[in-house]
Image (cartoon, rainbow, N blue to C red):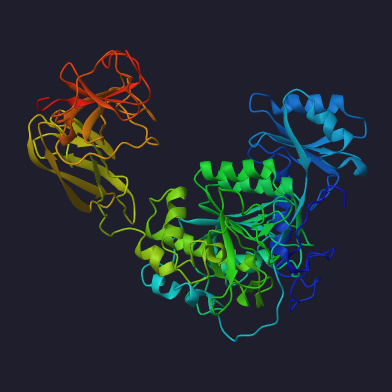
Amino acid sequence: MSGALVVYGLNNHRKQPQFAITSMSEDEPYDRDRRSFLRTLGALGAAAGIGGVAGATPGRQPGPKEDELLVGVEPTASVSAAASTVESATPSDTSVVHRNETLGYLAVRVPGSEASSESSTASGIRAQSGVAYVEENATYHAFLTPDDPQYGQQYAPQQVNAPSAWDTTLGSEGVTIAVVDQGTDYTHPDLSARFGSEDGCDFVDDDGDPAPNAASENHGTHVSGIAAATTDNGTGVAGMSDCTLLSVRVLGGGGGGSLSDIADGIQWAADQGADIINMSLGGGGYSQTLKDAVSYALSNGTLPICAAGNSGQRGVAYPAKYSECVAVGALDQNENLASFSQYGPDLDVVAPGVDVLSTVPGGSYERLSGTSMACPATSGVAALGLSANPGLSAEELRSQLQDTAVDVGLGEEKQGDGRVDAANIVGDGGGGDPTASLTVSPTDPAVDETVSVDASGSSDDGTIASYEWAFGDGATATGVTASHAYGAAGEYTVELTVTDDDGNTATATETVTVSDDGGGEYPAWDPETVYTQGDRVTYDGKVWEAQWWTQGTEPSSEANVWEMVEDDDPSTDCSGIPSWDGTTVYTDGDEVVFEGTLWRAKWWTRGTEPATSAPVWEMLGDCQGSQ
């Protein structure tokens, strides 16, 4: 097991993941004629390589690859050159067996004792020019938890309000969910209509057939059925959506798969234009290879949605923990967090994941539990949202998914933004009016003072296409933010108009009162606040204006950063205040009049004129009374 980083769900101490017993034997055939034909085609195509992924080296075993290290290549280096460098710098029993030009990494087979990121071989590779990182080709597993059936009918679609969403859309065939998993039985009567001209790709056996090898490999088929089993066809169960499926086989018969196969599968799915990648799998810690893969997917418009993990512990598993992914926890039928579901600050949403009825190979159906089941429920809901509003980007789809989730009262760490809701995301998926929101600062400027406006608080169920500003004096502007200076005192109405991609509009207004001297109340000076040129504050009953950037400098100091522009303090009545005398000793708080201005001593002084630059005197203002 050297080099393997494995998470096994609830039975973490066992050496094999636990699965529910299927209704078919492992050897029972299902549509073998079609599978054999596709395997022949796949074997012919595998040698050509797939989208920047070099064909597998002969003899490279399918499934987990615990005798391999993954070597990341610097962005400025060539993957081919790095492969040559690594091979020349390592012992003869070490060889490069796989390379991915797009994600920029190599797989290197090493002796079993050296298949650790801390081994001498890893250290030697890490020291080579062009190498960014070295990590183990860890094993990831399906996040499935077995359980006996407890209910005689589906509850998951109802729990996320899918039937209400189906009144608007059953899902578009133009939206594709890539199921990166154990392979999907695309001949299943409830799934066959969901596959287009491309069934998928197999990264385990590299034979071109993305179906599982045996009926006991049921995880991917079960996941696919939750996301997109055909609805309203008089057969079996109803999936969340009638969107298109793409089977990406990266896990083998034991439910495990290598990190490199998973990364390659993610990249391939994104390159095929998948809108959503469902990953009901995980294990191990942080992997730069996998991080690069999900980043690649998101940057290419594909939203990764991942199971949070089944250990029941605080802390979300990888890959769900990556910021690029939507991390999904599991609820039971009563909307309590499932006992096995991982949780924590990185959890984004929750969905039904206990005793979920769905498809399994050979045309059958079973109930399974796990965050593996909650994940495709979320993917299906997201697919409905994208079907209702196909203009959403991957980032916008993620925002809609989380913003429309329902609070089920579990607290943020155990529900994230809440339970996903199909009716909400479809209802908010497009067609409604936008909401206009603006901020104006300041609202009581002086003539010619710059006023800044910001519409970033505006929102829409789709996309806001334009922002238009009218400042009330004939001036206009466009954009999320803008600025304007009024040339005359008076009261003006700033109006914002936002228009969404459906042509719907909304407006919001704010009143601005312009005065000759800025008017209004100014904030008290705060030593913690950063002030810039033109900012005004009150200090010791006076109004001061900053001449440039400052923080922590008192307005009454001798520094030239502040200029007094207004004096409202009646204490500048100088009646009874003595004139400064060069022979008198003054101490803290003593006040004097010097050249028509009132001054206060800040500490002991004698002979120092108040008008000098010495900081001992504080100017209080011009005298308004007689001595």
Q: Residue at x 30, y 28 (%)?
A: 555
Quick check: 421 left or right of 150? left
- Which quadrant, please, contains the C terminus? top left
Q: Quick one: 541 or 530, which is closer to the camera? A: 541
Q: Determine whether 192 is above or below 614 in the image.
A: below
Quick check: 430 left or right of 214? left
Where does the image place residue 27, in percent across and percent down from the top left? Answer: 81, 71
Q: Quick one: 544 or 104, which is closer to the camera? A: 544
Where does the image place residue 51, in percent across and percent down from the top left? Answer: 63, 39
Quick check: 57 left or right of 453? right
Q: Residue at x 25, y 47 (%)?
A: 438
Q: Quick one: 210 or 38, which is closer to the camera? A: 210
Which quarter of the picture shows residue 545?
top left
Which quarter of the picture shows residue 443?
top left
The count of marks equals: 0
Where does the image place residue 422, in percent across and percent down from the top left? Answer: 44, 67
Where does the image place residue 476, in percent across and percent down from the top left? Answer: 15, 35
Q: Residue at x 61, y 75 (%)?
A: 356
Q: Is residue 237 visible?
A: yes
Q: Is residue 187 visible?
A: no
Q: Determine whether 114 is above or below 246 in the image.
A: above
Which quarter of the picture shows residue 132?
top right
